Image (cartoon, rainbow, N blue to C red):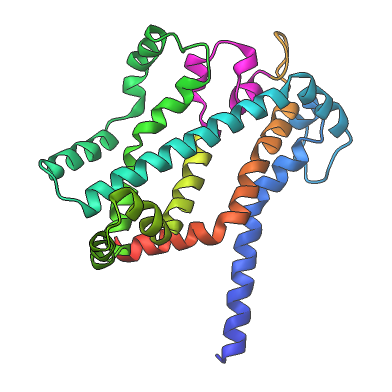
Amino acid sequence: MNRSLRTTLTTSTIALFSLFALLPFYIMLVMGTYQNEELFQKIVLVPGHYLMENIKTVAESRFDLAYMNSFIVSAASTVVSVFVSCFAGFAFAKHEFKYKKQIFSGVLLTMMIPGQLGLVAFVIEMRYIHVSSTLLPLILPWVANAFGIFWMTQFMKGAIPTEVLESARIDGCSDIGVFFRIVVAFIYPAIATLSLLVFLWSWNNYLLPLIIINKPELFTIPLAITSLGNAYRTDLAAQILGLTLGTIPVLILFIFGSKSFIRGLTAGSVKG
């Protein structure tokens, strides 16, 4: 088999699998253009004629407010998580202090505990400090992101030469200066990857908002989608259209950040 034929076969195979991967997303787009009852009558493969009515249903549910709430929560969660993870990862990877291994093991152990186990205690804590009627309880858990700390620690161990840090310290640069002037430049792919992951997890988070948010004006995208319809009828077509609209920001982020995302994953896998 010559090289050009092998390239053609590889390209065709990748294109075929890509089409299969995109098929569920296409069907989701199409289902959002049908009336609710029509979805149960046949398999829909071409766009319907009920798109504007579904858009009207979604718009009347204050979907724009849910969009803004989700964006505030996801953006703040990403900034907080990445900031704390970078500092903690720098400490674990490039500093020596007492009980470092034990503390890092404790951080790793928290990754083994299902988050659902602490939900009741977390809800009680939020009520105790009187922030349960705000968006703050959806952001605070990201302050202690064990995966982010582990990810940054492993990345910094392989990506940052210790000699460069020591040279900067000899030249009189403080630890804060070393971090912002040197470390950040080395770990940019890891920051981009972690930012995308945290934003995606926070954007799609359903369980915590469902338990702790009880005001419609504080609903995030997942809660707003489930609330579409009324007491007598669940509008599945409008919910699917809401899902499509809720996917757009994540798609945009991934399209513009895919190179950094892949570079961060690849570097982590090689050097970690």
For the stretch drawn in magenta, the main secondary structure is: helix
Task: Name the residue rendered at 40%, 57% in the picture.
Answer: 181
Which residue range is magenta in the image?
203-227
Task: Name the residue rendered at 51%, 59% in the picture.
Answer: 260
Q: Is residue 76 above or below residue 66?
A: below
**Which percent across, then down, holds residue 28?**
70, 40
Q: Is residue 86 above or below residue 158?
A: above
Name the quadrant of the C terminus: bottom left
Residue 223 among those drawn in magenta: yes
Q: Locate residue 91 relative to residue 141 in the image: left or right.
A: left
Task: Name the residue rendered at 55%, 90% in the picture.
Answer: 1
Q: Nearer the viewer, residue 137 or 220?
A: 137
All told, the count of numbered labels is 0
**Which percent across, then down, holds residue 164?**
28, 66
The quarter of the displayed image where residue 112 is located: top left
Q: Locate residue 107 relative to residue 233 in the image: left or right.
A: left
Task: Looking at this view, name the residue that lies furthest to the left.
Answer: 98
**Which percent across, then down, holds residue 158?**
29, 63
Task: Name the residue rendered at 44%, 36% in the picture.
Answer: 80
Task: Looking at this view, name the residue that lies furthest to the bottom.
Answer: 2
Q: Nearer the viewer, residue 91 or 137?
A: 91
The quarter of the displayed image where residue 88 is located: top left
Residue 237 among those drawn in magenta: no
**Which percent across, then down, holds residue 36?**
78, 26
Q: Nearer the viewer, residue 31 or 238?
A: 238
